[in-house]
Image (cartoon, rainbow, N blue to C red):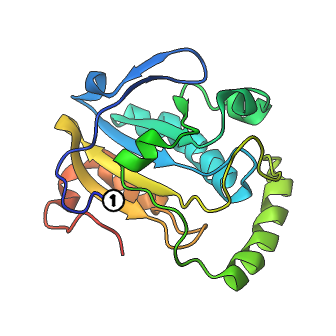
Amino acid sequence: MSLRNTALAPLFNLKDIYGRQINLEEYKDKKIFIGFFRHAGCPFCNLRVHALTKVHEKLKAKGLEMIFFFESKESVLLRSTFHQEVSPIPLISDPQKVIYGKYGLEENSGISTKSHITSFIQTAIKAKMKGVPMHMMKDGESINTIPAEFLVDKGFRLKKLHYSKTLTDRLDLDLIDKFADDSSIFDNDDRETA
């Protein structure tokens, strides 16, 4: 069940992999990007995290905070230098996918295997060039998790929901930047990206 008909982002109060308590209620007066990713070795997700960490300081200066979720166990994420270096952005491990469920993420129901293989080869090359991790699933991780990204305005108002249709389907970075400048850009929007 997606959050299409929900006005507010579901709250959570969890520790991130760095041991910090991340209580969404403390973000009430901030704009937030919340990203849900697959497993720690997914090159699609790690390239996205790499791109987001590059613009983090610029967006934070505009008042936009980021919070990342991975389905991987904390121990798997902490073995990865790449994921350890995502801080200061909170990175939360949710292997039971409790928060994934609250945000309406579902298992893969329509991604084409053929397009996945083609894009995987291209993505694997990019991941290797950028030095981001890429490995098979570990410790109960799933190949079927589909990413999602949410732009949340002050007061936890959901402004843009993006449930990925493919593993490379993400919100445009320019759109995130525009939201950081002016969250009213979505006032006449249906909140969901097709």
In the rendered image, the vertical position of residue 59 relative to residue 143, given as above or below? above
Q: Quadrant of the N terminus?
A: bottom left
Counting from the top left corner in percent of width and height, residue 136 is at 82, 53
Number of marks in picture = 1
Quarter residue 139 falls in? top right
Q: How many neighbours does mark 1 have within 10 angstroms: few (below 14), some (14-19), or many (20 or more)?
A: many
Q: At 50% from the left edge and 43% from the top edge, which residue is drawn?
A: 97
Counting from the top left corner in percent of width and height, residue 61 is at 40, 32
SS for callout 1 = strand
In the rendered image, the vertical position of residue 137 relative to residue 61, given as above or below? below
Quarter residue 10 falls in? top left
Q: At 84% from the left edge and 64% from the top edge, which residue is drawn?
A: 125
What residue is pinned by disc 1?
161
- In the foreground, 20 or 32: 20
- In the foreground, 76 or 123: 76
Left or right, residue 96 beside residue 129: left
- In the foreground, 190 or 6: 6
Q: At 57% from the left edge and 50% from the top edge, which residue is drawn?
A: 37
Left or right, residue 116 beside residue 60: right
Quarter residue 115 falls in? bottom right
In the rendered image, the vertical position of residue 120 relative to residue 130, given as above or below? below
Which three-letter amino acid code belongs to the residue tagged 1? Leu
Left or right, residue 10 beside residue 57: left
Counting from the top left corner in percent of width and height, residue 28 is at 22, 29
Q: Quadrant of the C terminus?
A: bottom left
Q: At 70% from the left edge and 33% from the top edge, which residue is drawn?
A: 77
Left or right, residue 128 beside residue 67: right
Counting from the top left corner in percent of width and height, residue 170 is at 50, 63
